[in-house]
Amino acid sequence: MSKLLVEIYTDKYRGDIYAIKEPLTITYKDKSFTVPAGFECDGASVPRFLWPLITPRIDPRSIEGATGHDYGYRTDLKGWTKWMLDAMFYQMLVKHGLAKWRAVLAWLGVFLFGVWSFRPFSVTYERYRAMWAVVIGTIAGCILGFILRGAHLI
């Protein structure tokens, strides 16, 4: 496993963050890109409920894959799709020693929930909050309807 120099610190709003201290070249199949020194990342950005099953967010086995994945999601890398970045993330996790079953869970997390962060499809924070408000409101309305019907109030 290669040794990537990083600086880890805690940000008031973003939590644990690391910045890479040297450029990192990511290669997947016949494509490659370079993440510039200074790029900041929060580690493996998989849903919080999967953390105990996969790995700590900042883990030596996931730093390179997570950094390349986050950089690809945040920038417009020509010729790279979300699918390719997610597959590269999985490959890098396995390459650096994460068990395959854990890497599959991490891949599923970014594959299913990463669409909100992938730059070409990203939504503003306000639109994201509004979307979830509608989803939560709909679910709450359904639950309330079932409760009231069960109590014969409607």
Image (cartoon, rainbow, N blue to C red):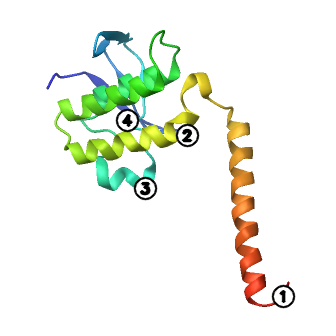
User: How far is the residue under mark 3 from the one under mark 1?
Assistant: 36 Å
For the residue pair 65 and 115, the one nearer the viewer reads as: 115
Indicate the quadrant where residue 70 lies: top left
Image position, residue 59 (x, y; %) = 27, 38
Secondary structure beneath disc 4?
loop
Between marks 1 and 4 in the image, the one whose residue lies nearer the viewer: 1
Q: Viewed as shown, does residue 61 lie left or right of 40?
A: left
Between marks 3 and 1 in the image, the one whose residue lies nearer the viewer: 1
Q: Which residue is mark 2?
A: 13
Badge 3 or badge 4: first in the primary sequence:
4
Does residue 122 sit above or below 108 in this rendering?
above
Q: Which residue is mark 1?
A: 153
Q: Please, what is the three-letter code of the amino acid marked with disc 4? A: Gly
Q: Which residue is mark 4?
A: 43
Q: Is residue 7 visible?
A: no
Q: Residue at x 73, y 69 (%)?
A: 142
Q: Residue at x 48, y 9 (%)?
A: 78
Badge 1 or badge 2: first in the primary sequence:
2
Q: Please, what is the three-letter code of the amino acid marked with disc 2? A: Tyr
Between marks 3 and 4 in the image, the one whose residue lies nearer the viewer: 3
Badge 2 or badge 4: first in the primary sequence:
2
Image position, residue 12 (x, y; %) = 52, 40
User: How far is the residue under mark 1 from the one under mark 4?
Assistant: 49 Å
User: How far is the residue under mark 1 from the one under mark 2?
Assistant: 44 Å
